Amino acid sequence: MKAFVVNQYKGPLQRAEIPEPVLGERDVLVQVHAAGLNQLDEKVRLGEFKQLLPHDLPLVLGHDVAGVVLQVGAKVTAFQPGDEVFARTGDHRIGTFAERIAVAEEDLAIKPATISMEEAGSLPLVALTAWQALVERGNVGPGQKVLIHAGAGGVGSIAIQLAKYLGATVATTVSAGNKDFVRDLGADVVIDYRSEDFADVLQGYDLVLDSLGGENLERSLKVLKPGGRAIGIAGPPDSGFARQLGASAFLRGAMTVLSAGIRRKARRLGVTYQFLFMRADGGQLREIAALVDAGVIKPVVGRVVPFDETSEILASLDKGGVRGKTVITHN
């Protein structure tokens, strides 16, 4: 079958013919209709996670999928051929930039009925990131104040909608041209990062979801109230992430060192920092699908491109300029 593979880290993404997926007894074979592109795909290509998430090369990239079930393993009970499904594949089971993929049953969910395959393919990674940050870790609820950086991006555009549904007052940072867009998503306070300093404008926030890292993350600590929490998805990683991966004691120590500076600054301000590397979770996707079908969360797809253009589109992903997600389609 056709797929896009990377033969060596930092090498180009190339079209290739690869063997059909091997179906385990708890796996579901999915015909890929759409696959979202994520910055994570490019980071994997560059080898940024090779010490933590080693993969055999050549490697088919792609973490998000929406498609139709073709076949199920002998012990699969929740799905049957013909089901329309979506998923963020497991860390060691990626490969959605292909015609078909075998997905673990536990990572899969029925696609929301009210949206297209392309919209469903845009959702899993970013929606799970928002859910695990705001619901699972942040326990966000009515009366709280949440700052979501890069509100017009893939994660930000979903996180704004989810935080608003949870009852929070939502602030976000965007360029001037995206102010009305994020207000329509539900943002209460909108800051043009090019002309305003959010750290001077905001205060007393319960949670910050940071997707930029570096100086932006450090300044985000200042807007938190005592006991507040900054959750970073751009790093630096911490020992909790190492435990999540089952990493060695050496790597746990290395990650503790990497995040020591930001954690120390957080402690001085009476707040906390956590790194979030989202995980696949079919159960959470079912809850997200219900919110989509209820009209609470609307996917934001800024660009849909043919499967044959996967390599070129991934290479241009870091240039930005797209609201929400870019999705490749086989249609």
Image (cartoon, grey):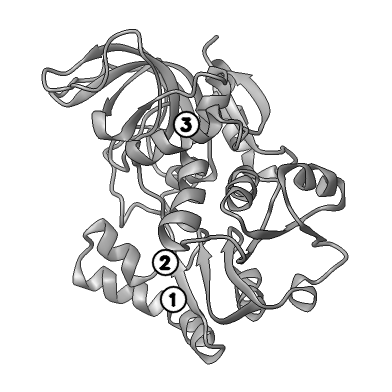
- To which quarter of the image does residue 144 belong? bottom right
In the image shown, does 252 or 169 lie closer to the viewer?
169
Disc 2 and disc 3 in contact, CB within 8 angstroms:
no
* Residue 27 falls left or right of residue 287: left
Q: Amino acid at mark 2?
A: Pro
Mark 1 vs mark 3, CA separation in Å: 34 Å
Indicate the secondary structure of the residue bearing disc 3.
Answer: helix
Mark 2 vs mark 1, CA separation in Å: 6 Å
Mark 2 vs mark 3, CA separation in Å: 29 Å
Residue shown at 56% from the left, 88% from the top: 269
Q: Amino acid at mark 1?
A: Ser
Count of numbered marks: 3
- Dot 1 or dot 3: first in sequence order is 1
* Residue 140: % across, % down: 52, 61
Height in image: 278 above or below 232? above
Q: Amino acid at mark 3?
A: Ala
Circle 1 is placed at which residue position? 259
In the image shown, does 139 or 107 lie closer to the viewer?
139
Q: How busy is the neighbourhood of tag 2: few (under 14 within 10 Å), some, or many (20 plus)?
A: many
- To which quarter of the image does residue 252 belong? bottom left
- Dot 2 or dot 3: first in sequence order is 2
Front label number (2 vs 3): 3
* Residue 93: % across, % down: 29, 35
* Residue 277 falls left or right of residue 205: left
- Whether residue 202 is visible here, answered yes or no, is yes
Disc 2 and disc 1 in contact, CB within 8 angstroms:
yes
Q: Which mark is residue 237?
A: 2
Circle 3 is placed at which residue position? 289
The quadrant of the image that shows the N terminus is top left
Front label number (1 vs 3): 3
Residue shown at 64% from the left, 51% from the top: 164
* Residue 231 falls left or right of residue 154: left
